[in-house]
Image: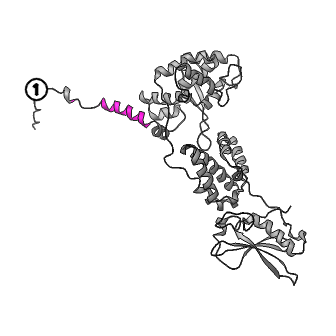
Amino acid sequence: MAQNLRAPRLETRAARLKLPISSKPVWVKIGVGVGLGYRRNTTAGSWVVRVPDGKGKGNYKTKLIGTADDHTEADGQGVLTFWQAQTVARDRASALLGGETSKVVATERPARDPTVDEALDRYEANLKKRRGDTGNVTRLRYHLTSALAATRVGELTELGLSDWHDGLAEKLAPATVNRTATCLKAALNLAARLDPRLRQNSSAWKIPLAAIPDAEESRNVILVDDTVCHLVIEAPAIGPAFALLVEVAALTGARYSQICRLVVGDLQTGDEPRLMMPASRKGKGTKKVSHRPVPISKDLANRLSAAAAGRPSSEPLLLKGNGSRWLKSDHSRPFRRLARRCQLDPAEVTIYALRHSSIVRQLIRAVPTRVVAVNHDTSVVEIESTYSRYITDHTDAVSRAGLLDIAAAPATGNIVPIAARTK
């Protein structure tokens, strides 16, 4: 089977529509003496094929083979993409040459456009290299249609991506749509960075995959200290290994994924015990600081030390009851049981309620916002946008302490004017 050839000026509709309107086609050689041409019209362009007419060097016969997909989605018959046009052109050329198919075989093997699915494979590998969250790709694949996954990046269109994005919006919350679309856009941008020829089609996904504004609605569950303590106290009834996990989550406010990555060497005991908490895999790029110290109580440090006794420093600090490491979602079922045991709604109160409660607890106890952000591996901007209500409540209490108390002022009859200063 002949290999398709690359032609950056003709591969995408965006590139073709930049060409001047002309009756003279732009040609690309697809075989020995065989050319595929694109004629830019005032409306949709047209594809033509030319072959030698046998009347001498430089003499050709030309045949119209279809309309370009400049304004209409390709159907593989009358309306053709650049890649489809190559296939049709070779068939027509073979017929025009009387079945001499050897003349219409491509003269070189080109680099092939990756499909969206292949672009996601490469993006996933890039995330692994940067220690990013590959779960983003897994979630995207679940919502990706088979047709879109098989589409080549250079053939993506605004209309096709808009239809897919609209379909997501019909079944998912706006914030989830944004996270899903952002992952796809990142994968396509990486493909374009690695292959400069794809950059001219980047406009195809820039607008359709733009974020839905005001999509983030905070529904964080904040628990009072008594409720958090109740969860920690009742956790051993579910299992001692699970109880350690819950207590670490309650005291540090770390994400479950960070807690799972703690190793024995991350525990620092002594008069001021702490955990060297691994940085999360959220956000862009590679984080400069891989671990940050988070203070814990001496009681928790002693229990963690006893659980880790005799194990190498590189082994996981927290293990499940069967001795294996905690993996993604392993905490979900036992925490639901714990929530029901504490008469809480398991659909509302998850392990992340411990993180949100920890952040708010520190805010209302006058811990500086910057310190709270560092302790919880997030940003000041994120805290101010997500927990602004609690910051406002706290600043209101602080401001009231400095209010003028007019009711406590002495009676006016007892006020004596201060004598004017004399020189």
Which stretch appears magenta? 387-405
Q: Residues within 10 Å of mark 1 (few under 14, many from 20)?
A: few
Quarter holding the N terminus is bottom right
> How many marks do you count on the picture?
1
Q: Position of residue 124 (x, y in %)?
A: 70, 44
Q: Is residue 271 visible?
A: no
Q: Which SS does the magenta portion mostly show?
A: helix
Residue type indicated by callout 1: Asn
Mark 1: which secondary structure? helix
Q: Is residue 388 visible?
A: yes
- Work out whether 391 lies above or below 340: below
Q: How is the image coloured?
A: one colour
Quarter holding the C terminus is top left
Q: Position of residue 94 (x, y in %)?
A: 86, 71
> Is residue 335 covered in magenta?
no
- Work out whether 289 lies above or below 414: below
Q: Position of residue 89 (x, y in %)?
A: 80, 70
Which of the pair 268/331 is nearer the observer?
Answer: 331
Which of the pair 102/261 is nearer the observer?
Answer: 102
> Which image quadrant for residue 56?
bottom right
- Work out whether 231 lies above or below 28: above
The residue at 62%/38% (across/down) is: 281
- Work out whether 46 lies above or below 55: above
The residue at 56%/16% (across/down) is: 234
Q: Position of residue 211 (x, y in %)?
A: 55, 50
Disc 1 target residue: 414
> Which image quadrant for residue 340?
top right
